[in-house]
Image (cartoon, grey):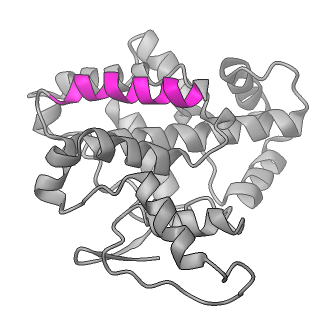
Amino acid sequence: MTLTKDLYQKLWNSADILRSNMDASEYKSYLLGLIFYKYLSDKQLEYVGELMEVEDLSLESLQDVYEETYDSEDGEELVYELNVRFSYVIKPAYTYTKFIEEIDDKSFELEHLDQGFRDIEQASKDFENMFEDVDLYSKRLGSSLQRQNETISKVMKEIASLDLSLYSGDVLGDVYEYMIGQFATESGKKAGEFYTPQQVSSLMAKIAMDGKEDIKGFTVYDPTMGFRVIIVIEANSYVNTRSSRLLPKFKTQKINSWCAA
């Protein structure tokens, strides 16, 4: 619960950095993209610690272990294990933790983050175009490359203290739902997205699933379910069959303003 509250507070603070130059329909893409990248990075470092049987599980210590092992004779085997586990590998130079080090010592460049995005997108079809809505060189971030760099760095620093590997819930889903809940009117202006409170979704799911908890193989169709596919999430949770796939909500198939899960 504490991590969730911290996450929401960091999102609000990050939105403050961006909202003066863009509306919520735009800056939520940056926040979702950066949160997701940090989640992938943190989970990978956590697994590195597990593989190497590290006692100090702080992200900074895990980063040191990752860099050392990556450049050692065990590096190839480590990369193989990461690929098997995640279907992607974030190189030591492109982890979120490394970027924060660079931001602190003033050596961070947007190209580093952009390369990290590209590496993940090219790692698997599941990740294809994952970060296409995150325009790191948008003039809305600043009139010059230096200004754009400074803006993104501020946002990254704001969420840097969160260790998302410890997050037990659905990070992206919770982030998206929180943002739509907080900025529903503004977010819906351009994207055509509408916010359904979770309590309503939960009630709808229970009604739809009543007496069907043990039925296997049936589907639910709702052309108005929206990006988060809340009714499906709630239904899955209700019968304890929630998917454990890495990208259950972020990679949905959008057809016009509809969404197929």
Q: Quadrant of the N terminus?
A: top right
Residue 5: within the magenta? yes
Q: Position of residue 178 (x, y in %)?
A: 38, 41
Q: Quadrant of residue 213?
A: bottom right
Q: Which residue shows up at 12% across the image and 26% down it?
A: 20
Foreground of the two, 227 or 41: 227
Q: Which residue shows up at 59% across the image and 77% down it?
A: 209
Q: Which residue shows up at 28% across the image and 53% down it?
A: 133
Q: Which residues are magenta?
A: 3-19
Asked whether residue 67 is in view, the answer is yes
Foreground of the two, 67 or 63: 63
Q: Which residue shows up at 77% across the image and 41% down it?
A: 47
Q: Main secondary structure of the magenta part?
A: helix
Q: Quadrant of residue 211?
A: bottom right
Q: Position of residue 208 (x, y in %)?
A: 53, 78
Q: Quadrant of residue 56?
A: top right
Foreground of the two, 171 or 158: 171
